[in-house]
Image (cartoon, rainbow, N blue to C red):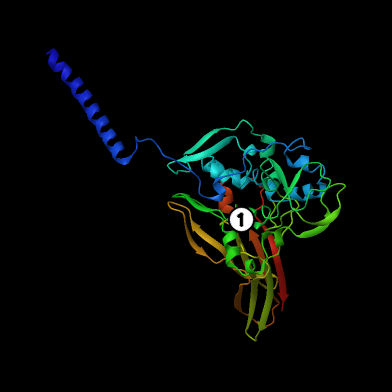
Amino acid sequence: MEMNNKRPFYFFVFFIFVLVAFAFWQGGRRGLFRQAEITGFTHSWDTIIPNQDVPAGMHALNAKECGKCHQEIYQEWKMSTHAHAWTDEQYQAELAKNKDLFVCKNCHLPVQNQQKMITTGLYDGDYFRPVQKKNPRFDESLQKEGVTCIACHMNNNTIIGSHPNINATHPVKMDTEYLSEKLCVSCHDAHDDLAEDLVCTFETGMEWRAGPYAKKGKNCISCHMPEVERPSATGAISRKGHRHYFPGSGIPKVKGEKVKKLDGLTFEVDTVHGAQFTRFALKVTNQNAGHKVPTGDPERHILIQFDLFKDDQIVQSDTFRIGEKWQWWPKARKLSDNNLLPLESRTYEKKYPIVPNHHYAWQVTVTKHRMTPEIHAYHHLSEKYPLSIEIFRKRVDF
């Protein structure tokens, strides 16, 4: 009887043994129990500027310290998207949903002093399994500044400028090659499949290289850092330099905040009136941008709305969209892309029937959008985070 009572126990132990043996066999077959291979980095956005020392003549690495002398430049930078690179609501929401992925931080915090962890490699090339250690020189105040002054103007513990050192309070190395558009596209040309449902797709640099302006010697700096003659610092001589507000879409990061924008598009309205119909057309041209419009974040888009008024009441509305469309789940893939190429023109038109003895008006409104209201809600973004701005409006009464 005692032997019979022990049989269930022996069968249970044998069953567990078989399961464990099978798991190890499968794991060995698939490489699950082998030692992971540590791989290096292959893209410009995989690595960042190493920890930097405070140069002689300075007391800190932050923008506020730079602003003590470079006062006008500092005020311009504070208006820029760069200054919001880390604190941006959308970015923080995306980061939280993607396990604090280190590679997403590298363009928003380009200097090692800004990051809590030092990433030295990847286990089996997997972005979600980085080889990391704590950064003893992490500076939280510097982190909040995002793409700050030293992100572009410092490397190898040296301040880098576009002019020779003349009476500066700190040593300066002149290096115009380092400060060229190559620095811009190291982040503004980041595109990679990080997971089935997660892609990084910023192709502005590629769009510029494929367009007409690269061949003419015009680059990112030509438009986004307008040339200006002024003293670069308090007490310095006046000479040619560049603005640092980095104008772009013109959609602020916080409602009511002052930003600079570039008008890449031009608009031409054409009308044809007949006895029983009227035709309205809007010609949109990417006249001034060296890349596609929109560019960058694939959620950006432009909406063109035609409204027909009859006796001051809207009787018909039509909307046209310029932008990319993506499927994000279960596998991320681009469905369509009608962004305007550099110098490309496109005409949107509508023909309307009209009835005599009524007052009509046609109005076109063009708006530039950071994202859709649905995505805004999905990320639980605040009402202080602007979604769009109006860039063109015209009304024709007839």
Residue 224's place in the image compared with 114, above or below, is below
- Outermost bottom residue: 275
Q: Residue at (60%, 34%) from the top-left corner?
A: 116
Q: Residue at (16%, 20%) from the top-left corner?
A: 7
Horizontal side of residue 207 vs 357, given as left or right: left
Horizontal side of residue 78 vs 202, given as left or right: right
Of 147 and 371, nearer the camera is: 147
- Outermost left residue: 1
**Which picture quadrant has residue 117?**
top right
Task: Give the SS element for disc 1.
Answer: helix
Residue 385's place in the image compared with 61, above or below, is below
Q: Position of residue 72 (x, y in %)?
A: 81, 49
Q: Position of residue 81 (x, y in %)?
A: 68, 51
**Residue type at the position of mark 1:** Val
Name the quarter where the N terminus is drawn.
top left
Crowd class of label 1 (few under 14; some 14 to 19; many from 20; radius 10 Å): some
Question: Which residue is labeled 1 in the image?
Answer: 185
- Outermost right residue: 235
Can residue 105 be spotted in the picture? yes
Q: Position of residue 36 (x, y in %)?
A: 40, 37
- Outermost top residue: 2
**Which picture quadrant has residue 315?**
bottom right
Can residue 381 be spotted in the picture? no
Q: Position of residue 158 (x, y in %)?
A: 70, 43
Name the quarter where the C terminus is drawn.
bottom right
Of 393 and 57, nearer the camera is: 57
Horizontal side of residue 334 vs 292, given as left or right: left
Give the total of numbered labels: 1
Of 385 and 356, nearer the camera is: 385
